[in-house]
Amino acid sequence: MKKSICILLLFVIIYGCITDKTDQLPKITADMIDPENPPVIEFSSAEFNFDTIAMGATVSHTFTFTNAGKTPLIIHSVKAACGCTVLKGWPKHPILPGDSGEIPIEFSPKSPGAQRKYISIIANTRPATNRLFLKGQVVGI
């Protein structure tokens, strides 16, 4: 009986720690979405040229952006067009006007030759989908 109570108490403590961290994230509310004045996502560069890399190598890059609009930017999702590009995260909280964020990626090519891959960012912008590009040459067998 004591063992069951201890296990239950342990679960309650763990749950309390987890919910404590999630409560600190800013809440997304309806007043952050303004169809008349959508946020504007501006990337410092929407294309990364990794030049020439060897087959099997991995290239890391971080795309930086700024919300140049008048309302908060909310990124719904970021998706790579192929399995060779791994997304390392993106801001899950609203980006206020004038604030910046980052989208780090890793690219591990699976075939040689000229490469041009894209990443789609779905947000409350107009248009809703924005694209980032990776390009370069992969050499090797």
Image: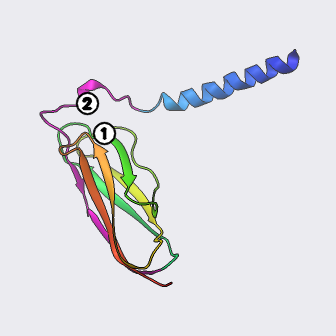
**Range of magenta residues:** 26-54
Residue occupying image coordinates x 66% and y 28%: 14
Nearer to us in this view, 94 or 125: 125
Drawn side of residue 52 relative to residue 3, left or right: left
Q: Which residue is mark 1?
A: 74
10 Å neighbourhood of mark 1: few (<14), some, or many (≥20)?
many
Residue occupying image coordinates x 63% and y 26%: 15
Is residue 95 visible to us here? yes
Q: Is residue 110 magenta?
A: no
Q: Is residue 40 magenta?
A: yes
Note whether 23 is above or below 110 in the view shown: above
Nearer to us in this view, 76 or 3: 76
Give the CA distance from mark 2 to mark 1. 9 Å
Q: Amino acid at mark 2?
A: Met
Nearer to us in this view, 99 or 87: 87
> Is mark 2 in CB contact (under 8 Å) with mark 1?
yes
Note whether 85 is above or below 50 in the view shown: above
> Which of the image's four quarters has the N terminus?
top right
Q: Which residue is mark 2?
A: 32
Residue 24 x/y as whole percent: 47, 31
Q: Amino acid at mark 1?
A: Ile
Give the total number of marks visible in the rendering: 2
- Indicate which disc, 2 or 1, sits on the residue closer to the N terminus: 2
Outermost residue, left side: 36
10 Å neighbourhood of mark 2: few (<14), some, or many (≥20)?
some
Is residue 50 visible to us here? no
Residue occupying image coordinates x 34% and y 29%: 28
